[in-house]
Image (cartoon, helix red, strand yellow):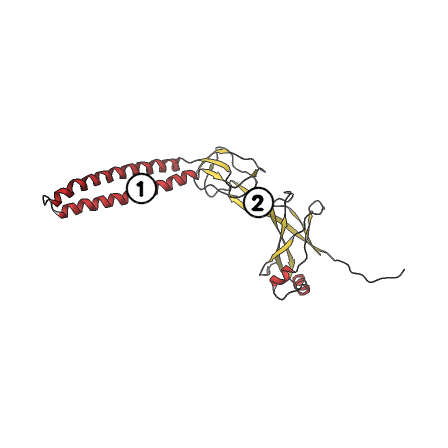
């Protein structure tokens, strides 16, 4: 048998973790009790879709207070306007002094400012009441829901997560020596040019199967982890079938 020279592709693989392109914690913006849960764990949701309803007595009280304050301010404004309308003709005829007229006009302007402040407070109170409906900020898949109907929650509590997995980020790391070898073999002068010149990578899933779509390395961390001597990479993978989920593990293979 005659040996012949030929090219061969060597592959290096690295442990990797998968995260959604947008992996967002959902927190309530008001304190209160969970009145309703509109979705289940694993549900596919759209941006703006209602996820939870919060019963917030404090927000309701603030709204009622703001409405009452506006009604009171408008009543005071009407009274001030009537006073100005009554005094101005008398001042023009010299029956009362201009100083007295000025006093009533100042009171009218102050009442106008009070109404504007009350309107702003009412707008804020209505906005806060709007926060009692917790909606999804992105299209994605709902994660674990640790709280149930009747639970007392505030903005420190994570109600769930919504992961946008139409595209996913796959994170892995390689050691400093391999990084220098890899960058040295790639075309280009700058790191950005070398990243563009990297071959497509593929993902080996936890069950040993190969993910059907290839990915592209998009970023290399600017610092070496002093504890591990490794550098973090991020590869972008399309996920049109929704096979990959945030939290998956596997191995990235670089040819």
Q: Which residue is mark 1?
A: 118
Q: Which residue is mark 2?
A: 164
Q: 226 and 16: which one is in front?
A: 16
Let me know if residue 134 appears in the view: yes
- Residue at disc 2, secondary structure: strand
Look at the image and tell me in which quarter the N terminus lies: bottom right
- Residue at disc 1, secondary structure: helix
Neighbour tally class for label 1: few under 14, some 14-19, many 20 plus, Cα within 10 Å: many
Neighbour tally class for label 2: few under 14, some 14-19, many 20 plus, Cα within 10 Å: many
Determine the residue positioned at 38% across, 35% down: 60
Q: 136 and 102: which one is in front?
A: 102
The residues tagged by marks 2 and 1 sit, at their Cα atoms, a distance apart of 40 Å
Q: Residue 86: x and y, percent? A: 16, 40
Mark 2 and mark 1 residues within 8 Å of each other at the beta carbon: no
- Picture mark count: 2
Q: Earlier in the sequence, mark 2 or mark 1?
A: 1
Let me know if residue 228 appears in the view: no
Look at the image and tell me in which quarter the C terminus lies: bottom right
């Amino acid at each position: 048998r005659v040996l012949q020279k030929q090219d061969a592709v060597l592959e290096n693989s690295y442990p990797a973790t998968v995260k959604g392109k947008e992996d967002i914690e959902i927190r309530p913006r008001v304190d209160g009790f969970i009145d309703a849960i509109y979705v289940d764990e694993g549900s596919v949701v759209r941006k703006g879709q209602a996820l939870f309803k919060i019963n917030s007595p404090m927000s309701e009280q603030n709204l009622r207070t703001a409405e009452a304050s506006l009604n009171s301010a408008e009543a005071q404004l009407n009274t001030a306007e009537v006073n100005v309308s009554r005094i101005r003709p008398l001042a023009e005829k010299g029956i009362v002094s201009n100083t007295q007229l000025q006093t009533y006009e100042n009171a009218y302007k102050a009442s106008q400012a009070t109404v504007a402040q009350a309107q702003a407070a009412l707008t804020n109170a209505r906005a806060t009441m709007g926060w009692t409906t917790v909606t999804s900020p992105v299209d994605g898949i709902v994660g674990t829901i640790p709280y149930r109907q009747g639970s007392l929650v505030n903005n420190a509590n994570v109600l769930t997560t919504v992961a946008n997995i139409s595209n996913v980020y796959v994170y892995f790391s390689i050691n400093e020596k391999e990084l220098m070898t890899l960058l040295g073999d790639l075309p280009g002068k700058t790191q950005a040019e070398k990243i563009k010149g990297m071959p497509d990578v593929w993902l080996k899933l936890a069950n040993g199967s190969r993910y059907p779509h290839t990915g592209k390395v998009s970023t290399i961390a600017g610092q070496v982890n002093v504890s591990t001597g490794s550098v973090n990479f991020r590869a972008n993978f399309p996920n049109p079938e929704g096979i990959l989920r945030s939290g998956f593990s596997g191995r990235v293979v670089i040819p």
